[in-house]
Amino acid sequence: MNNQLIVTAYFIYLPIAILMTALVSRKLFQSGKVFMMDIFNKNEQYALSTNRLFELGFYLINIGFAFKILYIQDISTHKALIEALASKIGGFSIYLGMMMFANLYLFFRGKRIAGERRRERMAAMQE
Amino acid sequence: MEILAYFIYLLLAAFLVLMVGYWFYHFGEVYIIEFFPQNQSFAKQMNKLLLIGYYLLNLGLILNTFQSNAPIHHLPDLLNFVLQHMADSILIIAIMHYNNLFWIYFLSHHQSFKTKYFQS
C-alpha cells in the first residue's frame, strides 16, 4: 500500500483525463456550430446558445465520469502503477470516443430532421 | 483530516455550482423567453427562480455529503473522497441538464411554436 505511488497515479490520470475532454470538446463543438446554424435556420442566438449548452453538458458528464472511475485500490510496484494508469486512461478514452460519437449522431440527426422540415414547409407554402 | 476534506470539497463544489449555474442561466435565457414570448420580464423572473431552485438543490446535495462516515487517513483517501463526491455532484447536474434539454426539445414541438419557426 504505497501512498506515494497512488497519489502519483491520481496526479497523472487527472490532468490527462481533463485535457482529453477539453481537446475533444473543443474540436467537436467547433464543428457543432456549423450544424447548429443549419438546424436553427441561421438564427445565431439559438445556434450558439444551444452549442454552448451541449458543450457544457459534454464537459460535465465526461469529467463526472472521469472522477467516478478514479479510485485505485492498491499499488505496490511501479509496474502496477503503469498498468493501473493504462487501464484507467484507456477505459476513459473509449468512453470519451463513444460520447463523441453520440453527440455527433445527435448533430447529424438534427440536421436531417431540420432538412426534412424545411422541405415540408417549402412544399406546404407552394400549395 | 475529514474536516480538511469537507472544506476542500465545499470550496470546489461551491465554485462548480455557482459557475455552472450562472452559465446555464445565461445561455438558457433564450429558451425561457421562447416559452413566454408575450411577457419577457416574466420569463426572466422564471429564469431567476429556476436558478435559485438549482442552488437550493445543490446546496442540499453538498451538505448531505458531510454525513459520510468513511475515515480518511492518508492523502489518497482525501483525494478520493473529494473527487468521488465531486463526481456525484457533477453527474447529478449533468443528468438534470440533459433532462432540461430534452424537455426544451420536446415542448418546442408544441403546436404554438411551429408557426414561429416557419416565419424565420
Image (cartoon, rainbow, N blue to C red):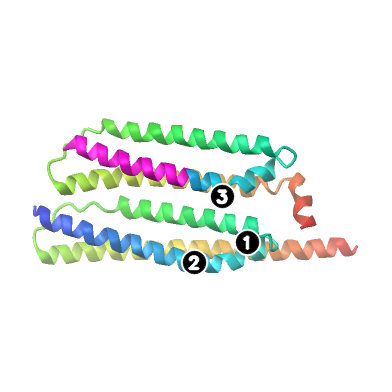
Q: Residues within 10 Å of mark 1 (few under 14, many from 20)?
A: some
Residue sitting at x 63%, y 50%: B105
Question: Residue beneath label 1, please?
Answer: A110
**Quadrant hosting residue A32:** bottom right
Query: Under tag 3, what secondary structure?
Result: helix
Which segment is the magenta one? Answer: B1-21
Q: Is residue A91 visible?
A: yes
Residue B5 lies within the magenta run? yes
Residue sitting at x 67%, y 43%: B33
Image x and y of residue B102, in percent:
58, 48
Question: Residue beneath label 2, please?
Answer: A28
- Image quadrant containing the C terminus of chain A: bottom right
Vertical position of residue A2 compared to residue B96: above or below: below
Tell me which chain the residue with mark 1 is part of: A
Q: Is B56 on the left-hand or right-hand side of A73?
A: right
Query: Under tag 1, what secondary structure?
Result: helix
Query: Under tag 2, what secondary structure?
Result: helix
Residue sitting at x 70%, y 62%: A41
B77 and B21: which one is in front? B21
Q: Amino acid at mark 3?
A: Phe
Residue A62 lies within the magenta run? no
State how far apart marks 2 and 3 are (Cα).
Answer: 19 Å
Q: Is residue B70 visible?
A: no
Q: Nearer the viewer, mark 2 or mark 3?
A: 3
Image x and y of residue B46, in percent:
61, 35
Q: Amino acid at mark 2?
A: Leu
Q: Amino acid at mark 1?
A: Gly
Q: Residues within 10 Å of mark 2 (few under 14, many from 20)?
A: some
